[in-house]
Amino acid sequence: MTSPERIGSYRIERLLGAGSFATVWLGHDPVLGSSVAIKVLAENWYHDLRVRERFLDEVRLLRGIDDERLVRVHAVGELADGRPYSVMGLADGGSLRDRLAAGPLPVPVALDLLAEIAAGVAVLHRHGVVHRDLTPGNILFRSHPDGERVLVADLGLAKALAAASGLTARAGTPGYMAPEQDDPLAVVDTRADVYGLGRLGVRLLGADTCRDTPAPPRPDGTVRLRAEVPPPVADVLRRATALRPADRHHDAEAFRAALRHAVASAHRSVPGPGSGWRGPAGARPAGRRFAARAAGVAVLVAVGTLAGDTATVREAHLGTSGPITVALPPGWRAVGTGWAGQYGADGNLEPALVMSPDPRRWAADPTVPGAFVGLSARTAARTTPAGFVAERPHAACAAAPVRRTRQAGVDWVVARFTCDRGRPVVVEAAGLGPDRTGLIYVQVVPPADSDAGFVDRLLAGVRVR
């Protein structure tokens, strides 16, 4: 396959993937200086009006919903040969299929992830759309200042609920699609996606972690899950994958609520011999680790314990989180012990903290200064400090030239943004920690009356043991 030099105004860098109906290219936007994914209808299908319309249906659905839990469409165009293409946000964290190929996820992480996937599918259901093809390859990850976002992708088979039944062509992926999707006369509604969510849960939590597709159920409808899976969760998956749609949860939101209740009830109970629930001490209910979300221009609620009830505020001159120690500016306090959405090799949150005169108000109040500091070995393996800063362009703000500074033995890449709305100034900085084993990320909203050296003094106070 020959790589095009340009598609529209975008410079093409490389092929990201190719499927039966489309190819996806990594493109570069020269105006914004950012990367995008460009999906192009395959050459052998563009004369087929049905396939072409399916391609455009996906674009219309994504554009019409435009939610952070779905892949976003920025633009649509047509090549010289008549093939349509769509310009989409780049999912730089790969797919769930990629991650499962590297090995099973820890059970608490898998439960959180399943709840987040269900939340994305619930967005579709609220807009009257059924996905019909929920598979690990269609669950993507995108970097975000407050940790990764889980994205539901590939709506090529999605249907408006009003049109999803009656002479509908067979559609879906074996192992994940609901039984009724194999019947062209059957009603296909939100409960088909519930079945897909249940099968994704079996793939994430199943005892046979080497399978590419989830294990088939036993004659009684049960599947063999890992011993650490709480029995109430197994009951939720059993109901979600019932053969009769009427026996399943009504939609993705109902499935998610049942999953969260099952995990919470497992944590409230005292596990006895043979209970099957042997989760790690301190594990939290599904959804908590992915609960933090950005508020305002780019300010983070990125510390995992901010979403819970156990955060400890430190009034001393130093803030600490794991190996991170930060010298606090006068009058500032620190809170938090983990970077929401960022997990180490052990499945636990990577260390992070928020510091501010009022850490709990910082995320929501643009008048409150503050800073986020996080350390990620996983991010260091994926990108460079300069690459990480470049992923945070703040397109609505004016960017100063990126500069470099060396503070306390760390070479920092620093980008400063001046904004008309929200926070007047946002500074993004990244550097490599000792032995280059972790990327240190700092986002700063300086006090309005601070001098030009405030950010460098703050960076000089960051230490990693």
Image (cartoon, rainbow, N blue to C red):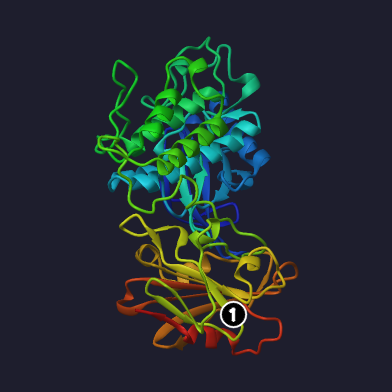
Tell me the quadrant of the picture where the C terminus can be found: bottom left
Q: Residues within 10 Å of mark 1 (few under 14, many from 20)?
A: many
Residue 414 at x, y percent in the picture: 53, 79
Which residue occupies the extreme top position in the image? 185
Q: Residue at x 64, y 33 (%)?
A: 126
Q: Secondary structure at mark 1?
A: loop
Residue 244 at x, y percent in the picture: 46, 14
Would residue 169 be seen by someone viewing this image from the given angle? no
Vertically, is 233 above or below 34?
Answer: above
251 on left or right of 95: right
299 on left or right of 347: right
Q: Residue at x 42, y 34 (%)?
A: 135
Camera-nearest residue between 233 and 166:
233
Would residue 201 be seen by someone viewing this image from the given angle? yes
Camera-nearest residue between 42 and 117:
117
Which residue occupies the extreme right position in the image? 420
Residue 272 at x, y percent in the picture: 29, 38
Camera-nearest residue between 216 and 185:
216
The disc labelled 1 sits on which kind of residue?
Trp
100 on left or right of 251: left
Residue 286 at x, y percent in the picture: 46, 44
Q: Residue at x 63, y 20 (%)?
A: 163
Q: Residue at x 60, y 38 (%)?
A: 123
Residue for badge 1: 332
